[in-house]
């Protein structure tokens, strides 16, 4: 039997940004530098590149000498395609033994020159959108350690950012916490994880169980959420993730300017309160003690003078700490976790 | 762009039961004969076969002459493997131009001789456990026609049987109704469908939308359910199916003797009432008018003298018709549908 594994990446990374002109498209690379600088050896830029991640420039040979183990394609260009001129470098990196890590929609194995180079050196081609084989069906058995899952009123509601910021804040408060990735960008930041929305439906809760395995009693997994229970396209993913994560706590993530499901404008957003209730009701199935410990709001589209009122009002309605993690940080949510779970 | 299709089978079928000794393992074949005799041309049996489906014996040549278009592997043997001695016949059928239809866990394309024969004749190799490519993400848009979905307190709770019996009973009552298949056996019975639990998680509700497309206003799709919202392994499948089916009505399927989730004995079954409530609450997202029209109970494990009390008591508690479809038929549920939806 093949052992069950997450997608697992080898650091340090050489981050390929090539000849990029616009930093908007370097979000993957800049996210890694922002959140996990310890994973980064350097950046690989071509002469005409106009973006700088603020880490050392390296050739592939220099990166190998410096101990780099993976070339991470650090861009998400329009159309999801890497420019033709980059492939020679990707092939060279594979030949030099660097794993190639890609989160775009194409498959690295469809590029014969890269495949051949990787085979010769023993490097791995890792499409982080491809889930591992042999995932189990969820067994629903209680695991040790504590878990907090980001849930949302919609997709793109700040679940990844909230999980990363909360992990950092818990660690700063002296707690033991690990970010657990469920999407391709998160996997590159965490160095491991499973792209849960690409898993065959029968195995979603099983994949969630693999993502946050047994751990020390006082360790917290901070799990990146996906979709929403009320999303007409993706709710099945969200429920499988909720069941498999068996979270002790949830944080509700919400974009304050959002009135309808993004891209599904014929669906009004469920209220924050109803979304919390629904997640608690369904989540009780695998963790009867589940509770909500805070609300993480993206207020960037609100007028500056409405921001505080919005958060205060939501806090009064729900009795929960409400923060914009980008502005306020997550310490109020961490305080709530420490109050609710004083023993951990 | 490749067009989106369900798995679609060509009838009539020649049903292969080979040298089977025990009718228990011929459930697939006998199910087709029971529910869809009009799809069946005949059966292919070897000399030492001890099972009889009660349809004409045919050689492959005779079946082709009689207009058969598919050889359906009509058995589900222990271990999920077809005996070696059967493969010559499967290859012969493929060479003769019959599609080969298989619901077992192996893939027909992994058998080179069969693949080669099929390529030469133009026959298709159809693994009904393999979903079609290019399924859409669910769009949640209202479709025309009416839909009734089987939901359950567990897997193997009689959802397929209930859907088939209800379809028949609605047709007998003069209603327009079609059975819609979401699992491999159902697909062979319906001649089409999608094995929803094998779909990548992001596309489950989209697959459910494809399974029951727009239809005439007074037409009912009777949709085979899968899993349960409270199932620790499979709930994501059930929620995606519920959302994508956007059912006007649900029928709750339950095994009266079941106390815990089958195979997940550390999980007590949710009550029938709570299961109905949960399905209605989640189902309102894509069909605000959703309601429960009946309870279909497998009472085969109850003592005969407790059966009536059990159903009466459940009927009083829920105010819904409660039947064992195998014993009572589904006419009480059909009556309820006609009362609740008098215009259809």
Image (tube, coloured by chain):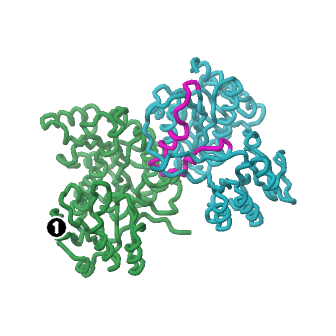
Chain colours: A cyan, B green
Does dot 1 land on a helix, a strand or a loop?
Answer: loop
Q: Residue at position x 49%, y 55% from top?
A: B206
Q: Nearer the viewer, residue A44 or B296?
A: A44
Q: Nearer the viewer, residue B71 or A226?
A: B71
Specify whether A72 is left or right of B291.
Answer: right
**What residue does disc 1 label?**
B48
Q: Position of residue B223 (x, y in %)?
A: 36, 53
Q: Residues within 10 Å of mark 1 (few under 14, many from 20)?
A: few
**Residue A295, placed above or below residue A74:** above
**Is A197 part of what is drawn in magenta?**
yes
- In this picture, which residue range is highlighted in magenta? A189-218
Q: Residue at position x 62%, y 65% from top?
A: A110
Q: Quadrant of the C terminus of chain B?
A: bottom left
**Is A322 part of what is drawn in magenta?**
no
Q: Position of residue A63 (x, y in %)?
A: 78, 51
Chain of the residue on which disc 1 is drawn:
B
**Residue A113, placed above or below residue B261:** below
Q: Position of residue B22 (x, y in %)?
A: 18, 57
């Amino acid at each position: 039997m093949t052992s069950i594994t997450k997608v697992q990446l080898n650091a340090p990374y050489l981050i390929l940004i090539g000849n990029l002109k616009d930093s908007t498209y370097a979000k993957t690379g800049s996210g890694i530098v922002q959140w996990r600088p310890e994973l980064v050896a350097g950046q690989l830029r071509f002469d005409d590149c106009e973006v700088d991640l603020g880490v050392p420039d390296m050739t592939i040979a220099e990166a190998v000498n410096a101990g780099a183990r993976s070339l991470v394609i650090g861009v998400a260009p329009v159309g999801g395609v890497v420019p033709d001129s980059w492939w020679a470098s990707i092939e060279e990196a594979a030949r030099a033994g660097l794993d190639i890590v890609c989160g775009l929609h194409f498959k690295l194995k469809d590029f014969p020159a890269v495949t051949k180079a990787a085979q010769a050196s023993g490097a791995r081609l890792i499409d982080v959108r491809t889930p591992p084989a042999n995932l189990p069906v969820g067994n629903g058995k209680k695991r040790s350690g504590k878990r907090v899952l980001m849930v949302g009123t919609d997709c793109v509601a700040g679940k990844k950012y909230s999980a990363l910021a909360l992990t950092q804040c818990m660690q700063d408060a002296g707690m033991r916490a690990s970010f657990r990735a469920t999407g391709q960008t998160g996997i590159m930041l965490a160095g491991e994880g499973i792209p849960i929305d690409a898993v065959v439906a029968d195995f979603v809760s099983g994949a969630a169980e693999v993502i946050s395995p047994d751990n020390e009693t006082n360790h917290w997994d901070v799990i990146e959420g996906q979709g929403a229970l009320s999303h007409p396209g993706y709710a099945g993913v969200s429920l499988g993730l909720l069941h498999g994560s068996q979270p002790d706590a949830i944080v509700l993530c919400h974009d304050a300017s959002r009135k309808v499901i993004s891209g599904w404008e014929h669906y009004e957003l469920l209220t924050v309160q109803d979304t919390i209730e629904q997640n608690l009701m369904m989540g009780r199935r695998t963790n009867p003690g589940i509770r909500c410990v805070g609300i993480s709001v993206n207020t960037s589209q609100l007028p500056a003078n409405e921001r505080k009122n919005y958060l205060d009002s939501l806090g009064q309605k729900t009795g929960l700490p409400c923060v914009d993690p980008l502005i306020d940080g997550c310490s109020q949510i961490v305080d709530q976790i420490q109050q609710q779970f004083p023993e951990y």
